Amino acid sequence: MPVVPSAYKPPFYLLNGHFQTILPGLFRQVRDVPYVRERLPTPDNDFIDVDWSLVGSESVVILSHGLEGDSERSYIKGMVKIFNSRGIDALAWNYRSCSGEPNRLLRSYHLGASDDLDFVIRHALQTGKYQQVYLIGFSAGGNITLKYLGEAPEQVPQQVKRAIVFSAPVDLKGSAQKISKIYSRRFLKSLELKLQEKRALFPDKVDLSDYNPLWSFPEFDERYTAPLHGFKSADDYYARASSKQFLKNIRIPTLLVNAKNDPFLSKGCFPVQEAEQNPNFYLEAPSGGGHVGFAIDFRNNIYYSEIRAVQFLLEEFD
């Protein structure tokens, strides 16, 4: 029965899921996070940029950001800062094309790119410094993390001990259909800029002649995500990349925290049955929190996601 109760309650002045999503995303600032960037050459002649924040630990937390995010997002830096304060190294990786420079290949990233997460984890282990690895994912990065843990659990390195993810769209089709144009328009404008960079590199393979930032995500994924990443269609992409089907296989303690008022998540993103049937997979569904929000005291930079991550990853299983 790893469906767990939640102690989280949003502050009264963040009135609903939209406020709880938008205000932290727009106005939160996290300072004094020292990053050292490393560029990792990939086996397919591309690269992934990762940002380290080191305190000299034998443990490392690896953080995966959300759609069109990067290692500079406040929710990433806030998590880096709190784990550094607990004596844990941090590695925040940027998906292909998300580090401020276009990647070299026609492909970039998608919400099922667990192969790249595996590559980053194995790079961290190859340093020879780490006995424990913890995984944290947000939104798209949450889906990638859960998919990674469940699709081939026997291949997950033994140093990977625990994971926690927030606001993860484990049912990609349902979330793609639910997200409103208020949010999707912002993402699709950002994605258009990246596609323009791709068109400059691959003019015969990227057609932007009728690009419409008011498309739905299923329309965008049918036109671009699927064909550029080897999927037959948007439905094929959603079916193969959604992590929900893999949750039953997860073998390490893993917690999914999805708010019931998250404006991005469909009903299918609350996998109660999977949590009830897998003793390693925990679901927490607070009534509030929005999407990658979870503020406790917005004005004083206190966030439930960070408190809960430290508690679950470092304390609950001592």
Image: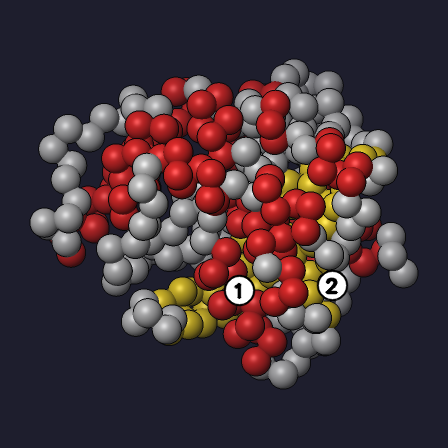
Is residue 304 visible to the viewer in this orientation of the structure? Answer: no
Quadrant that contains the N terminus? top right
Quadrant that contains the C terminus? bottom right
Q: Residues within 10 Å of mark 2 (few under 14, many from 20)?
A: some
Q: Is residue 3 above or below residue 49?
A: above
Which one is earlier in the sequence, the residue at label 1 or at label 2? Answer: 1
Q: Which residue is mark 1?
A: 118
Q: Amino acid at mark 2?
A: Lys
Mark 2, secondary structure of its residue: strand
Residue 279 as seen in the image, left or right of residue 217: right
Q: Is residue 253 above or below residue 243?
A: below
Q: Measuring from the top left, give residue 307's x and y in whole percent.
A: 77, 45
Outermost residue toward the top in this view? 15
Task: Name the residue located 47 percent from the left edge and 44 percent from the top edge.
Answer: 241
Mark 1, secondary structure of its residue: helix
Q: Measuring from the top left, give residue 26's x and y in whole percent.
A: 50, 33
Q: Amino acid at mark 1?
A: Asp
Q: Residues within 10 Å of mark 1 (few under 14, many from 20)?
A: some
Task: Name the residue located 36 percent from the left edge and 35 percent from the top edge.
Answer: 234
